[in-house]
Image: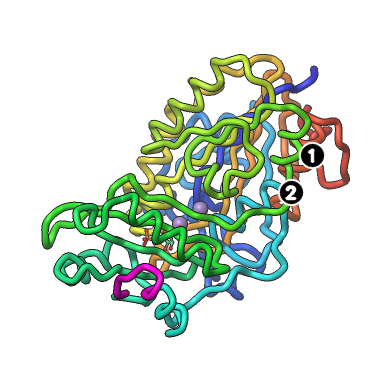
Amino acid sequence: MKIDRITLIVLDSVGIGAAHDAADYGDLGANTLGHIGEAAGLSLPNLASLGLGNLAELNGVSKTLSPKGAYGIAVEKSKGKDTTTGHWEIAGQILEEPFPTYPNGFPAEIIQEFEQKTGRKVIGNKVASGTEIILELGDKHVSSGGLIVYTSADSVFQIAAHENVVPIEQLYEYCQIARDMLSVGRVIARPFIGESGSYTRTSNRHDYSLEPEDNMLTKLKSSGKDVIAVGKIFDIYAGKGFTEHVYTKSNEDGIDKTLSYLKQSNQGLIFTNLVDFDMLFGHRRDVLGYKKALEYFDERLPEILSQLKETDLLIITADHGNDPIFKGTDHTRENVPIICFSQNIKPGHIGIRSSFTDISSTILELLLNESSENSFAKKII
Ligand SMILES: O=P(O)(O)O[C@H]1O[C@H](CO)[C@@H](O)[C@H]1O
Ligand SMILES: [Mn+2]
Ligand SMILES: [Mn+2]
């Protein structure tokens, strides 16, 4: 049976254990799914029935002798453990050189140029957790109008500003200024609202990525396929290669919008990112929140499966880890699961894939008949 539509869902940061090179990233022993299972138990019966429990020892996720899905593990080849790097690799691009990071903040020349171009002073300029830095510097920002600039272990230039001090559109302009100046992976607008002592971030976050090379997405689009981005997918690839996109406010909204595209008669790729795992729970080191988000996804999985026609394939994967039990608040260098389902799937293990690009190779083989060594298409369909 020919596959004419693939739904690719990235569970942002849902890693399945430290990568072989985790030590290079200070991440030896990290294991997002494993540690959540150990600490809080995981009830994921639907993912288990597809084969998740056959991939690793996960407390609460049982192994099955008759999996309904095909499943494997993918290793990241690119240098880096950020969202952009992981997603670009999923779409076929390997980064030999990592995006630049700024563990000591941005150099004075960059900050001065940015201040001069925006007409605002910069405060912060250090590595920080986004929720903590707005509590630390929010008052100073509100009284002075200075922009809170911060970074992390990721290649990011993040600008936090109160929505009443810097209107959203103006914050977005400042981000574009930074984007044009820098080669960081992403510039991110981090607006917040509220009163002193209780500032909270809003969903007006906006990411400005570098443009990827031509990849699976541009190939699909130029072959006339629908290439639909749900959630932050569109921004991660700087909008390149899509025919349609929609932003989302939460995992729930992302699942709803994926379902609504599945109910339409499109042909090609529906590509969804569910970011709550990472943003709300991984970076916040919130084990229980992360567990509940995984269980919520699992509960909704049957709705997604029930929308799949004979010619549909579902692939669930992740872009990096973010172990909520690990030190710090950053991503962790981990392998990621690959779980596939189709009505005519050949169930079983598809092996340890040596790069996330095997996903794009598989999608291109199934949708465009482009065969390649790295594709696991023939193992699953
Ligand atoms: O602490 P917050 O602002 O959520 O930052 C997190 O989100 C950014 C993008 O993923 C990274 O810098 C990461 O550290
Ligand atoms: Mn991510
Ligand atoms: Mn993140």
Q: Nearer the viewer, residue 247 or 50?
A: 247
Q: Nearer the viewer, residue 332 or 193?
A: 193
Q: Which mark is residue 214?
A: 2
Q: Amino acid at mark 2?
A: Asp
Q: Amino acid at mark 1?
A: Phe
Question: Which quadrant: the N terminus?
Answer: top right
**Residue 8, position in %: x, y?**
61, 35
Name which of mark 2 and mark 1 comes first in the sequence: 2
Secondary structure under badge 1? loop
Which residue lies at the image location 61% right of the left edge and 58% below the top edge? Answer: 85
| Span colored in magenta | 115-122
Which residue lies at the image location 72% right of the left edge and 29% below the top edge? Answer: 347
**Residue 339, position in %: x, y?**
63, 37
Mark 2 lies within 8 Å of ligand 2 (Cβ measured)? no
Residue designated by label 1: 376
Q: CA distance from mark 2 to mark 1?
A: 21 Å
| Vertical order, 299 against 27 (above or below) | above
Residue 349 placement: quadrant: top right
Assign ligand 1 to one image quadrant. bottom left
| Vertical order, 93 against 301 (above or below) | below
**Residue 271, position in %: x, y?**
59, 35
Q: Which of labels 2 and 1 is toward the front? A: 2
Q: Nearer the viewer, residue 364 or 15?
A: 364
29 on left or right of 108: right
Secondary structure under badge 2? loop
14 magenta-colored: no
| Vertical order, 65 against 75 (above or below) | above
Which residue lies at the image location 41% right of the left edge and 78% below the top edge? Answer: 111
